[in-house]
Amino acid sequence: MSRRLPRRVEVTARAKLNLGLAVGPRREDGFHDLVTLFQSISLADTLRAERTARGLSLAIRHESAALAPGGAAGLRGSVPAGADNLVVRAAALTLERLGLPGGVRFRLTKRIPAQAGMGGGSADAAAAMAAVLALHGVRLPRTQRIELGARIGSDVPFALVGGTALGRGRGERLDSLRLSRPFRAIVVVPRWRVSTAAAFRRIDRTKYGLTLWRHSLRFASSLGRERVTPSDIGRLGNTFERVLGRQGRDFEKLRARMRVAGLLQPRLTGSGSGVFGIVPRRASVREITGRLQGDDTVFLVHSVGRGLRLRTQP
């Protein structure tokens, strides 16, 4: 008896933080070697998918998940619709590579801010891949899912796996890790934005520090021996913090405000512009956010153990 395929699926696609990120030398293929400590967090988009006879379509709705929505409306920009959206690109690639028939109608509820270093586009792409596979009853081994995800973007493999992981190469070579304990964090997304491409160009123009890169590699090799602790965040740092250009002063002012508010080890996530700080154990989030002055957009998140959650509907 053949298994009945679901007509609809819903995927929760979680954002990520880079608890640390070191950029290494530029490779012959044009990419840079990276060492990064990924962590899935509770902030998530929702992707609903329904099988259709042909074609791919996408409707996008924005929903604020911010505690303090100072610039929330501005976080909606730069989320393309149609064929340029990573949801459509990921679905098209999955259908093509696996030779699957038919099409998919997608509805995406966006909560993860754009251009904040939180991997919203990659999470949505991973969700689209998972939805297509579920709609067709296909199960791919982890290695094949990661290989397919890497064709879409460097952060997509982690979005597929989730939890806590050390990323190397372009970020697609993943070693799963465990946290010493769950944590809460406040993520502040300022009004200014960072161009990832421009940040990499600034890294290429600076005098490259091989000593710092070797230190990052040693740190990475030690991570698998113990559970990841909040103190590991400070040990790896984030290379992009040193190439913020005109936003560098704004970043330092924001980080100082976060420390005064009571947050631990404020750090850029990805290439920015989101800045996160760890909430101390038993600290009051209300008091911390009350001390955070400014008109930035503020999110409360906590660590989670998976990147995707999928529910099927007959």
Image (cartoon, rainbow, N blue to C red):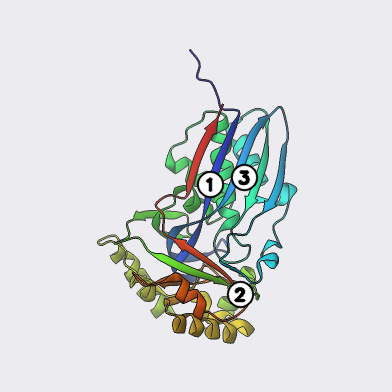
Q: At which x and y percent is residue 46?
A: 58, 47
Decide: is 18 above or below 177: below
- CA distance separating discs 1 and 3: 16 Å
Type of amino acid under label 2: Asp
Mark 1 or mark 3: whose residue is earlier in sequence: 1
Q: Secondary structure at mark 1?
A: strand
Could you tell me if residue 301 is visible in this image?
yes
Q: Secondary structure at mark 3?
A: helix
Q: At which x and y percent is residue 27?
A: 52, 65
- Residue occupying image coordinates x 49% and y 85%: 256
For disc 3, the neighbor class at 10 Å (few under 14, some 14 to 19, many from 20) is many
Q: Which of 58 and 62 lies nearest the eye of the viewer?
A: 62
- Mark 2 vs mark 3: in front: 2
Q: At which x and y percent is residue 130?
A: 53, 40
Type of amino acid under label 3: Ala
- Residue beneath disc 1: 12
User: Is 262 left or right of 108, judged from the image as shown?
Assistant: left
Q: Quadrant of residue 213?
A: bottom left
